[in-house]
Image: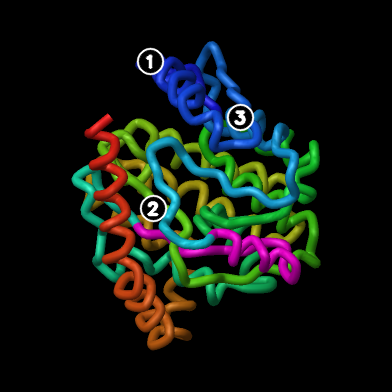
Amino acid sequence: MADDGSTDGSQAVIQAWTERYRGLFAKIDLLFQAENRGICQTYVNAQRRVEGERFVKVDGDDLLAPYNIFELTELLSDYDIICTGFLKFHTSDNLVKTYRTYLEVVLQAFIRGKTLRQAVKLGCPVMGTAIYRKSLLTEDVYHFILQFRTIHDRACFQKLLTGDQALKSCYVNRPIILYRVSERSISNFNSPSRRLHSEEIGRLCRVQREKESSPLLRLLLLLQEKSIAFRASSNRLVRLLRFLSPYFTLMLWLCIAHWPAIRKMERELVDRHWRECEAHCRRLTADDKKK
């Protein structure tokens, strides 16, 4: 369990909780930083301590979905990276059931091969809840991630997929993580975290552009980098201009090519899982209130 210099008493709560439930675990490592250094440093510290080959990471404000995670980790026998779905919920514990909210999630099923690598270079939000083998995380990958503060997932997968053309991935249309949407989370366009996150995506595009050999892709990366100004805007109308970016052009092309299948997968992701996941959220919230 890792904490990035919290000042709200989180570390004391973590220590008390781990002492109370220590018997449930074979081993617990507490990784506390005295000062806030960003999510990237926190995750690199934690991932360096992982001893097993297969692992899953969960942010402190999110939840694991109520399903057997070992069914997914077993797929690592055939694939290097397992991309999964996720569902969002608010602090009111109500799941977001609007289908179009999960368009980018199910698009992972259609972003493959060369298209996947180009999309990752553009800083696209694919593979956010992916499961992968620990052996993929070399010191070179860690060093790349540590150039940033918030985009550990995007930086990680950009480094992995642009460095190894033979990596095999698949998508499973089942939620593994339940993402909490709050005023301070990256999911909220108006939060300071979101603005910093958007700026770092632009910097990730700039880093990729500096080493890209294709003139066309360098141009697309420049356009994607400049579009961050629209993504980071607090004005809703200005944010609409982000749909002119190369990434959304790619999304539009994929939607046109696979629209019936995408709509079906959106409905399957939400309709098949929302009741059980929402009950899971409410149950955990009720347990927290009792404590």
Instruction: Please identify the quadrant where the N terminus is shown.
Output: top right
Q: Residue at x 31, y 64 (%)?
A: 276
Q: Could you say where residue 63 lies in the image, as x and y percent from the top left?
A: 40, 47
- Return the x and y of residue 202 as percentages of the image width and height: 52, 43
The reply to whether the C-beta atoms of the residues labelled 2 and 1 are less than 8 Å apart is no
Label 1 sits on what residue type?
Answer: Gly
Numbered range of the magenta stretch: 69-87
**Do we see residue 63 in this rendering?**
yes
Q: Nearer the viewer, mark 3 or mark 1?
A: 3
Give the residue pinned by disc 3.
Answer: 28
Q: Residue type at mark 3?
A: Ile
Disc 3 from disc 1: Cα separation: 19 Å
- In this orientation, does residue 219 appear? no
Tell me which label, 3 or 1, sits earlier in the chain.
1
Q: Nearer the viewer, mark 3 or mark 2?
A: 3
Residue extending farthest front: 23
- Which labelled disc corresponds to residue 9? 1
Disc 2/disc 1 C-alpha distance (Å): 24 Å
Residue that badge 2 annotates:
178
Residue 248 place in picture, x, y as percent: 44, 65
Q: Which mark is residue 70?
A: none
Assign a secondary structure to mark 1: loop
